[in-house]
Amino acid sequence: MTFDILIRNIKGLVQVREQVSGPVKGADMSNLPILEQSYLIIHEGTIADYGPMHALPSAIQAKSNLDATGRYVFPSYVDSHTHLIFATSREEEFVMKIKGATYEEIAASGGGILNSARKLQQMPEEELFDRALIRAYEIMKLGTGAVEIKSGYGLTTRDELKMLRVGRRIGEATPLLVKTTFLGAHAVPKEKSKAHYIDEIKNEMIPAVAEEKLADYIDVFCEQGFFTPDETEEIVERGKAYGLKPRLHANQLHRSGGVQVGVKTGACSVDHLENIGEEEINVLRGSRVIPTALPGAAFFLGLPFPPARKIIEAGLPLAVASDYNPGSSPTGNMNLMVALACIKMKMTPEEAFNAVTINTAAALELEHVCGSITKGKIANVFITRPISSIAFLPYSFGSNLIETVILQGRIIQHPED
């Protein structure tokens, strides 16, 4: 038998797990299984076998043979929170922030989410797709193999559906595994009252999204000045009635109550967490909700970083995602998120790599498909350049140390290469 890809002489095969039953929690997050001096066999899009080099049969044949001497092989990153689809950048707001403007002041001046919505509403679907496709290849080149993509810059039924169609198309046009999330409750359009807009979300948008089967999840920006916990619960329960599972923006700018409503409604995850304390951590204990940190947004906005050490010491799992969006985290570079998790959240490299692979996979209900080196899982992996240790990746936070990306068993060639 001739296999598709054989990777030989791997310095360290990272995140090797024979079985996966869910996210890694608490003290177990410091355990990152690495098989040294190993090989990996990929066939028909999946991980077929792996083991120590001394056990590799001498007569094995493969269409592609890759020598990974001095290199590590990781499972591809799973980015469980992005706003990958947007019309244009917002660097003018970046300059406003430099000059001292707050998030709220920028929004009041016509910037923020409503700024992105105006631009997106004017853009045809095909152009929106072309721009999103460039970003999709960008994140693949940086090691991401699975991604969640939200709507939320449409704020009309037509434009929210447009965004979700583009998200689905990204999953069809690329080897990325894509989950889509309906985030109509991202902000309230200026021309509508909140009550009217919530009614539109519940009785027009959600049924339309469900009819076209455009989303896997529903999200709400539960935050002061946006949607209250009661409003969030009302919208989420309506989405659940149409088969949309909740995942929530929670506790970014204030102690918003988002964590509590996430636990109450059985959310897959509560994301952001820049402003949580013992009360929210205690609420998360005993639940299946996965707390997810978005350090790129905390860094960009100058907010407190999520208290990773307290979350982990409480015995909870912790996921880390990029929050790729034009306003508060304009990057989908998960290598940078690992570095920020280590440098600013005081996570060890082992904890951080668990947080961006198996735990983000669990947050997207993909832990049995990707997020670890496990036989039968989709062959989403990347090979580093020659490096001294896994800690060298977050240590060298300004360098791209990924040499080869393999998604769904294929070596990825990028359009610009």
Image (spheres, rainbow, N blue to C red):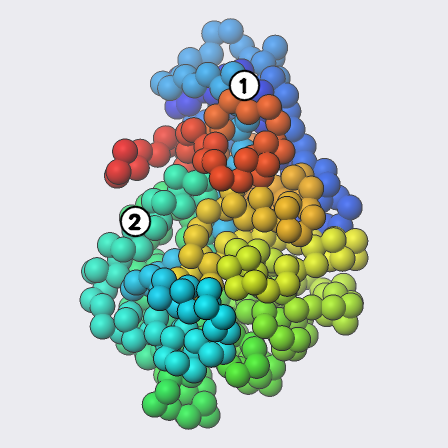
Indicate the position of residue 348 as horizontal and vertical percent values. Answer: 69, 42
Q: Nearer the viewer, residue 4 or 414?
A: 414
Q: Amino acid at mark 2?
A: Ile
**Alpha-carbon neighbours of circle 2 within 10 Å: few (<14), some, or many (≥20)?**
few
Indicate the position of residue 146 as horizontal and vertical percent values. Answer: 46, 48
Q: Secondary structure at mark 2?
A: helix
Mark 1 and mark 2: Cα distance apart in space: 31 Å
Report the residue marked by disc 1. Answer: 70
**Alpha-carbon neighbours of circle 1 within 10 Å: few (<14), some, or many (≥20)?**
some
Q: Nearer the viewer, residue 253 or 23?
A: 253
> Height in image: 154 above or below 299?
below
In which quarter of the view is residue 156 placed? bottom left
In which quarter of the view is residue 230 placed? bottom right
In which quarter of the view is residue 389 placed? top right
Q: Which quarter of the figure is the N terminus placed in?
A: top left
Q: Residue at x 74, y 65 (%)?
A: 281
Residue 153 visible? The answer is: yes
Q: Residue at x 68, y 46 (%)?
A: 347
Q: Secondary structure at mark 1?
A: loop
> Height in image: 204 above or below 92?
below
Label 1 close to label 2 by CB (< 8 Å): no
Q: Residue at x 34, y 74 (%)?
A: 115
Q: Amino acid at mark 1?
A: Gly
First of labels 1, 2 by sequence position = 1
Point out the residue furthest to the top here. 58
Point out the residue furthest to the front here. 99
Indicate the position of residue 278 as horizontal and vertical percent values. Answer: 78, 68
Indicate the position of residue 371 as horizontal and vertical percent values. Answer: 55, 42
Q: Residue at x 27, y 55 (%)?
A: 131
Decide if residue 255 is on the left or right side of residue 42: right
Report the residue marked by disc 2. Answer: 134
Decide if residue 414 is on the left or right side of residue 267: left
